[in-house]
Amino acid sequence: MIKKPDNRKIIAVAVLIVALALLLAGSIRTHKVYESDTEEFGLLTFYRINEYQMVVDATFHGVAREDGRLYSTYDRSQPRGKSACPT
Amino acid sequence: MIKRRITQTISLLLLHSSWGPELKWFCNPVLSCHSCVLSWFACPIGVYIHYSGYHLFPFIALGTVLLLGIVFGKLFCGWVCPFGFLQDMLHKIPTRKLTLPKWTNHIKYLVLVFLVFLIPFFLGEETMYSFCRICPASALQVTLPNLFSSGSLVLSLATLVKLAVLVVVLLAVIFSRRAFCKVLCPIGAILAPLNLLSFWKVKLPTDNCVSCDKCDEICPSTVSPSSRIAKGVASNRSLDCMVCHDCRTVCPQKDK
């Protein structure tokens, strides 16, 4: 238990800075998500999505991991409505 | 307390209304199924489970929860969480009330480590052993509606387990207030240490406390706020306090 308020405030500010740093890092991060079952010239095609889109995909199994790569489970070239429940 | 009930009711309606926006990139630190089409926001636990399966670090999801947690502590648990609201209402059913042993409060940390991070990391995000597969909020928001809409009476083992957990949790909270929050909730496990550090303080008159113990009697988390008040510490500085402010509401000295 933290007894000294000074230590508590210092640690709280440190956690706040870490949280903001995580948000900043997430804002600039991108992910390579491959299209499943499509190839061009023998190479897999992929999309680059930002972290926000990855969070959305994580809520409805929009991405799956296979052989160390991330694959999209839906056609990203088509507009998507509200996601359906996978469970 | 009335303000809290109003806030909880508004939260329940707004967070689960399909006529709202879909802001699923934002992880609201409450237990609301991340895949429910009615939800405006994402459940951080579902996102962590998927990220663990993807072998990715959840920068945005973790940053959001840390930010809200360090600012507000477990305020969202007491004022916003719809599943917490359900527990509060069920506990009003007049029955004999029980107090769970203190050691059960540590189970949620094991749930967080194993069912949210480690098991999905090793077995994949779709593993049957993740927290999502036993989440009672998901059972209420997703599994039961899907069962009713499909009209099928054939239940898989996974569905049976999920519904069994839901029944046990709902029964437990009738007898022990906020039993799920104290024992199993992984969001509570993440926010609990932040309660000790958060900028949010429940201000109670620590100098002229008359030791009436009304705060202890009203406390839904049974975390003895009077013990901290006696030491001149804010009453929400406890791992399991859900910052409901009921202790402040009943304090006879707060306006003196």
Image (cartoon, coloured by chain):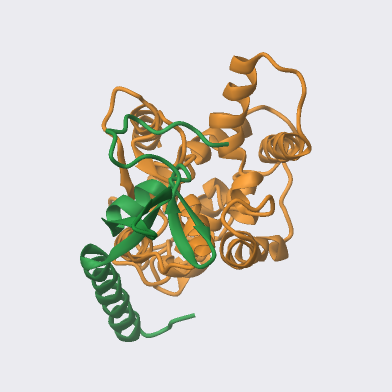
Q: Nearer the viewer, residue B150 or B168?
A: B150
Occupied quadrant, residue B112: bottom right
Chain rendered green: A
On screen, residue B28 above or below B53: above
Q: Is residue B114 left or right of residue B9?
A: right
The answer to whether residue B213 is seen in the rendering is yes
Residue B189 x/y as whole percent: 53, 62
Residue A51 x/y as whole percent: 30, 59
Q: Residue at x 42, y 70 (%)?
A: B196
On screen, residue A13 above or below B116: below
Residue B187 x/y as whole percent: 50, 56
The answer to whether residue B240 is seen in the rendering is no
Q: Is residue A66 left or right of residue B22?
A: right
Occupied quadrant, residue B67: bottom left
Occupied quadrant, residue B91: top right
Residue B157 x/y as whole percent: 78, 37
Drawing shade for chain B: orange
On screen, residue B242 above or below B2: below
Q: Residue at x 56, y 38 (%)?
A: B137
Q: Is residue B221 left or right of residue B161?
A: left
- Tally of numbered tags: 0
Q: Nearer the viewer, residue B67 or B152?
A: B152
Q: Quadrant of the N terminus of chain B?
A: top left
Q: Quadrant of the C terminus of chain B?
A: bottom left
Q: Residue at x 36, y 47 (%)?
A: A56
Q: Is residue B230 left or right of residue A22?
A: right
